Image (spheres, grey):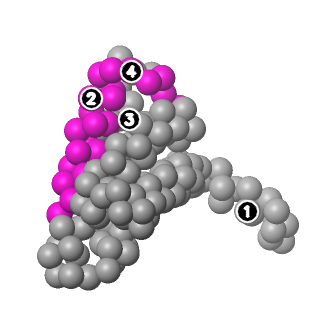
């Protein structure tokens, strides 16, 4: 006899908690990043590339603290933040490159956002899990 649906769903959530928490935090960070790009571009305060840079740093600060607490359940530290920032700067390079490509091709800036969202989150998760928040004997 199979367990009730509620039990199966709770088991799935428990099994994939890390990924689900990362997706939740990433979703909030994406709203911060993309929202700031839209506001800056639509109000003519900045072009897409500098808007993405601003959005990246806003989302990055939020994400570090939220992922430290909610996703990886580790205490924030400067040492860990340096790793987080290094991984994030790699992601920023990807973001700038893709938004620059969209701008150079004269595509709507939302195409650049779509390309960033399609490639960045998975790469960032894998790198943060294996580098930034890797468990060691010094960071329980």
- Indicate which disc residue 133 carries: 3
Give the residues in magenta.
Answer: 72-97
Answer with left or right where residue 20 lies relative to residue 120.
right
The label nearer to you, 3 versus 1, is 3
- Give x and y (percent) for residue 133: 38, 35
Q: Residues within 10 Å of mark 1 (few under 14, many from 20)?
A: few
Q: What secondary structure is found at the residue carrying circle 2? A: helix
In the picture of the structure, the residue carrying the numbered disc 2 is 82
Q: Is residue 16 visible?
A: yes
The label nearer to you, 3 versus 2, is 2
Observer-nearest of 119 and 109: 109
Residue 40 is inside the magenta segment: no
Lower position in the chain sequence, tag 3 or tag 2? 2
Mostly what secondary structure, the magenta segment? helix
Q: Are marks 3 and 1 in contact (CB under 8 Å)?
A: no
Q: Are marks 2 and 4 in contact (CB under 8 Å)?
A: no
- Give x and y (percent) for residue 138: 35, 17
């Amino acid at each position: 006899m199979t367990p009730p649906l509620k039990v199966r769903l709770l088991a799935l959530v428990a099994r994939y908690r890390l990924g689900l928490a990362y997706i939740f935090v990433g979703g909030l960070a994406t709203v911060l990043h993309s929202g700031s790009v839209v506001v800056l571009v639509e109000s003519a305060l900045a072009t897409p590339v500098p808007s993405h840079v601003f959005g990246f740093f806003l989302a990055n600060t939020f994400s570090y603290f939220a992922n430290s607490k909610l996703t990886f359940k580790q205490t924030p530290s400067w040492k860990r933040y340096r790793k987080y920032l290094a991984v994030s700067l790699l992601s920023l390079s990807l973001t700038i490159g893709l938004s620059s490509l969209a701008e150079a091709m004269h595509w709507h800036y939302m195409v650049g956002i779509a390309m960033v969202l399609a490639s960045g989150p998975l790469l960032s998760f894998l790198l943060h899990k294996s580098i930034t928040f890797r468990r060691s004997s010094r960071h329980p």
